[in-house]
Image (spheres, helix red, strand yellow):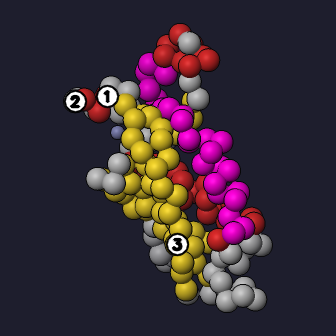
Amino acid sequence: MITCRKTYHDVPFGHRQPFHDGHCSFIHGHNWSITVTFACTERDVNGFVVDYGKLGFLKDWINDNLDHACVFHKDDPLLDQLVNAAPEAWKVYVVDDCSNEGLAIHVYEVFNALVREHTGGRVWVAQVEIEEDSKNAATYAPPAKQ
Ligand SMILES: [Zn+2]
């Protein structure tokens, strides 16, 4: 296996931790960075794992779903109340878990499927790291196959 990685820096979006007992339960934002590690066993004709110039589909997904969005936990008890109060004020994205760790898992699942689709299965995502404001980071890599 050989890998390469790409980072999407400073993607602004908000979230809140609805079940946190401290200030993380308030809606707030970060500038997030998403680092994707790509893997393959057979490189392309140029010797690349992936052609960085042909990853626009990942940037498009980030722009469409996360950039300037508010990411909500699917079980947030205030989700409907907040969004329905002023629907035009939100770009809403709902995930199973909007913690840094949950976002790493979610982005991994989305990106792995997109990368496999766009490369005919030659390339997969080995790992996703999500950074909050360059201070905190979470990394997800799927368990090795048993
Ligand atoms: Zn936060």
- As rendered, which of 137 and 105 lies closer to the eye? 137
Find the distance from the CA under tag 3 to the CA under tag 1: 32 Å
Residue type pointed to by label 1: Ser
The magenta-colored residue range is 53-80
Location of residue 136 with respect to 139 vertically, above or below? above
Q: Which residue is mark 1?
A: 25
Of 139 and 144, the residue lying toward us = 139
Which class describes the residues within 10 Å of circle 3: few (<14), some (14-19), or many (20+)?
Answer: some
Q: Which residue is mark 3?
A: 5
Q: Quadrant of the N terminus?
A: bottom right
Q: Which residue: 56% across, 41% down?
A: 67
In the image, residue 71 lies in the stretch drawn in magenta: yes
- Comes first in the chain, label 3 or label 1: 3
* Residue at screen point 29% across, 53% down: 135
Under tag 2, what secondary structure? loop
Tell me which corner region of the image, top left, top right, bottom left or bottom right, holds residue 130. bottom left
Q: Where residue 22 is drawn, which disc sits there?
A: 2
Q: Where does the image place residue 70, in percent across and percent down from the top left? A: 50, 32
Question: What type is the residue that disc 3 sits on?
Answer: Arg
Q: Real-space Cα distance between discs 3 and 2?
A: 35 Å
